[in-house]
Image (cartoon, helix red, strand yellow):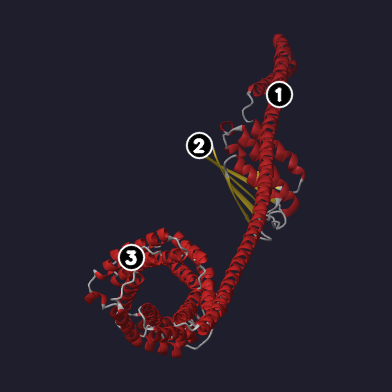
């Protein structure tokens, strides 16, 4: 397939052979490779001017492109088919239809070069059907795409020059032919330069400005006959047009020029050119007295023009015949050809009108289809907009819900934080109150101790001391029994006095008021002695005065929670609380010898959550170990 596209290595015939091999290998179906291959073959046959094969493979490619909904491929093939009908001159209407179909697709692409080329072909077809206004419009539409290809641009200017000439606007006709000429001269396209000079001269000739026409024919001949002969059709055209200009000026010495032009055109098999040469020769023979030859040329023109559907030149042939017979005085024949002329003119008018109507229908249908496509596209856009609007609404609602959820979550979080702060303050107040109560209890005990001490010292001890002194005053009684009893009671009184002094000294021992938290713990475990669980702890080993109240109250609540759970769920015999203390860290190990509880110690249970939260509040960490039917243990680390 690649070999069929390589025009630098392989000849056109070889490329066609390679493309045919590729096409035979590929199975014909709705696939991209078959479509590309058939389109390539159609393009190659177009280049080879094998229009029957072009038509065959173009239609295969078009069918596959339609099945694959390949709009760009459809447009390309329509363009090829348009060229097929145009080149075969089989049907200008079908050519116009395919070019319009191609234009619909190409207008959706950014391929400006293809769009410009297609619009130019449409303009040329409209010009050939004498629909000059639409041809001018199509040419200007092509110019709107700002052609970068100067050769293509020169062709657009050339078409505009011809159109303006037909519309009778010499000024614009010459202007556009000049623009085409300058571009072709810049590109060094000699045959097209000659064509532009010929067109300028002919425009002046058609408008009877013969001196200017002569000037531009001369410029064309300035290229030299040896060079002009390389382009025989343009060369014959210049010879014929310059001779016709001389004929219009009444000059007789141009017969050889007419004959030379006709000979070249016959050699080139240029049917359109042959008709023009014979028409001009007929005019020459009519003007300078050879009526029979004029009639022969006029009949040739009429016959050939009809065969090639060149009705305008057929009209010129009939007109020339009518003039010949009229000059011969054969009025009946002159009238006959005049009637044929009128009939053909009406037929041409009707034909051109029908073609223009068909062109108008094609343009209308194309515009309607384009409009429908635009409406469909707009509907699709609206559907997409509605879809995105729905998505946007859903997103907005989602965002609002998310915002509401986050707002509620934050509100709950704030409430929770506020509750924790309040709980912290309440715990602090409770601990302070408990400490105050403990302090007041100690103060009351201290006052009572002082009172008792004072009563014992000032009252009872002094009384006993007086009695002991009195008894010692009886030492002069020499009765042995009396002395024995006196010494016995004095010794007993002395012993009682010493005991009372010891009690007073015991009351002098100051109580440690700094250990209110330890007292709270001891009181807590004392109160829990009603449960059949032994409490083992070493809380006395901790210097509680160095630990903040917030930490102590949370420790107290944790102990309450774990002890309560042990009593309620674990069926334990002992609850053990082990403190390990240093200056930076307080480690608490809590355990029991029960069976544990899956219900209580599940990771989502409130007991676990409360303990974890309290440990977290004092920046500590907790590890909870619980295996079903085994004891539960906690290990808590709290930074001091």
Residue 440, numbered label: 1
**Of 310 and 345, the residue lying toward us:** 345
Q: Secondary structure at mark 3?
A: helix
Task: Identify the residue shown where x is 59% and y is 72%.
Answer: 357
Taking the spot 65% from the left edge, 36% from the top edge, the residue there is: 553
Name the residue rendered at 61%, 40% in the picture: 617
> Does residue 88 appear anywhere in the picture?
no
51 vs 145: above or below: below
Q: In terms of depth relative to the viewer, which is nearer, 312 or 105?
A: 312
Image coords of residue 327 (percent x, y): 44, 80
The one of 35 and 229 positioned closer to us in this rendering: 229
Q: Would you name the residue on which mark 2 appears? A: 583
Q: Position of residue 622 (x, y in %)?
A: 59, 48
Q: Position of residue 497 (x, y in %)?
A: 69, 19
439 on left or right of 180: right
Q: Is residue 285 left or right of residue 128?
A: left
Instruction: Look at the image and tell me in which quarter the C terminus lies.
Output: top right
The picture quadrant where one finds residue 225 is: bottom left
**Mark 3 vs mark 2: which is more N-terminal?**
3
Asked if labels 1 and 3 touch by Cβ distance under 8 angstroms, the answer is no
The residues bearing labels 1 and 2 have C-alpha atoms spaced at a distance of: 30 Å
Give the spatial CA distance, label 3 vs label 2.
Answer: 120 Å
Extreme-front residue of the structure = 329
Residue 513 position by quadrant: top right
For numbered disc 2, what is the local secondary structure? loop
């Amino acid at each position: 397939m690649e070999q069929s596209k390589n025009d630098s290595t392989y000849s056109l015939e070889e490329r066609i052979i390679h493309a045919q091999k590729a096409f035979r290998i590929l199975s014909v179906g709705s696939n991209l490779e078959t479509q590309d291959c058939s389109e390539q073959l159609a393009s190659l046959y177009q280049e080879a001017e094998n229009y029957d094969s072009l038509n065959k493979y173009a239609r295969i490619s078009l069918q596959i492109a339609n099945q694959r909904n390949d709009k760009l491929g459809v447009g390309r093939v329509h363009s090829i088919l348009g060229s097929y009908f145009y080149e075969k001159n089989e049907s200008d209407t079908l050519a116009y239809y395919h070019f319009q179909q191609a234009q619909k697709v190409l207008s959706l692409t950014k391929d400006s070069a293809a769009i410009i080329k297609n619009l130019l072909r449409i303009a040329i077809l409209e010009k050939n059907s004498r629909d000059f206004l639409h041809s001018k419009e199509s040419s200007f539409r092509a110019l709107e795409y700002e052609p970068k290809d100067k050769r293509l641009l020169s062709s657009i200017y050339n078409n505009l020059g011809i159109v303006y000439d037909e519309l009778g606007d010499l000024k614009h006709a010459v202007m556009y032919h000049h623009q085409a000429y300058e571009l072709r001269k810049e590109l060094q396209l000699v045959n097209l330069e000659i064509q532009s000079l010929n067109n300028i001269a002919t425009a002046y000739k058609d408008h009877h400005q013969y001196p200017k026409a002569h000037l531009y024919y001369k410029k064309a001949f300035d290229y030299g006959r040896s060079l002009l002969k390389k382009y025989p059709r343009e060369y014959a055209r210049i010879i014929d047009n310059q001779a016709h200009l001389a004929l219009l000026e009444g000059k007789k010495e141009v017969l050889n020029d007419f004959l030379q032009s006709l000979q070249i055109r016959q050699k080139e098999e240029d049917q359109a050119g042959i008709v023009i040469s014979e028409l001009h020769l007929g005019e020459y023979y009519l003007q300078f007295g050879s009526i029979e030859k004029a009639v022969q040329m006029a009949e040739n023109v009429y016959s050939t023009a009809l065969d090639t559907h060149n009705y305008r030149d057929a009209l010129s042939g009939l007109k020339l015949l009518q003039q010949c017979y009229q000059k011969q005085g054969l009025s009946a024949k002159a009238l006959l050809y005049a009637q044929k002329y009128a009939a053909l003119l009406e037929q041409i008018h009707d034909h051109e009108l029908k073609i223009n109507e068909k062109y108008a229908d094609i343009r209308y249908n194309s515009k309607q289809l384009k409009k429908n496509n635009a409406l469909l596209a707009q509907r699709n856009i609206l559907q997409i907009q509605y879809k995105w609007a729905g998505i946007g609404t859903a997103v907005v609602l989602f965002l609002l819900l998310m915002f509401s959820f986050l707002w509620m979550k934050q509100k709950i979080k704030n409430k929770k934080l506020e509750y924790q702060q309040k709980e912290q303050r309440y715990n602090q107040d409770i601990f302070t109150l408990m400490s105050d109560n403990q302090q007041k209890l100690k103060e009351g005990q201290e006052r009572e101790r002082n009172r008792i001490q004072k009563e014992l010292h000032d009252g009872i001890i002094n009384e006993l001391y007086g009695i002991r002194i009195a008894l010692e005053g009886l030492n002069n009684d020499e009765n042995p029994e009396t002395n024995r009893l006196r010494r016995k009671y004095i010794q007993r009184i002395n012993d009682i006095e010493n005991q009372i002094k010891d009690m007073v000294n015991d009351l002098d021992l100051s109580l440690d008021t700094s250990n209110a938290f330890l007292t709270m713990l001891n009181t807590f475990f004392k109160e829990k002695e009603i449960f059949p669980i032994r409490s083992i702890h070493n809380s006395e080993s901790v210097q509680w005065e160095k630990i903040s109240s917030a930490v102590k109250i949370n420790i107290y609540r944790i102990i309450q929670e774990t002890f309560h759970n042990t009593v309620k769920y674990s069926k334990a015999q002992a609850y053990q609380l082990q403190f390990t203390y240093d200056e930076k860290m307080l480690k608490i190990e809590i355990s029991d010898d029960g069976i544990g509880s899956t219900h209580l110690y599940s990771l989502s249970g409130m007991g676990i959550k409360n303990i974890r939260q309290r440990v977290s509040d004092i920046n500590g960490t907790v590890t909870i170990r619980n295996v079903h039917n085994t004891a539960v243990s906690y290990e808590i680390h709290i930074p001091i």
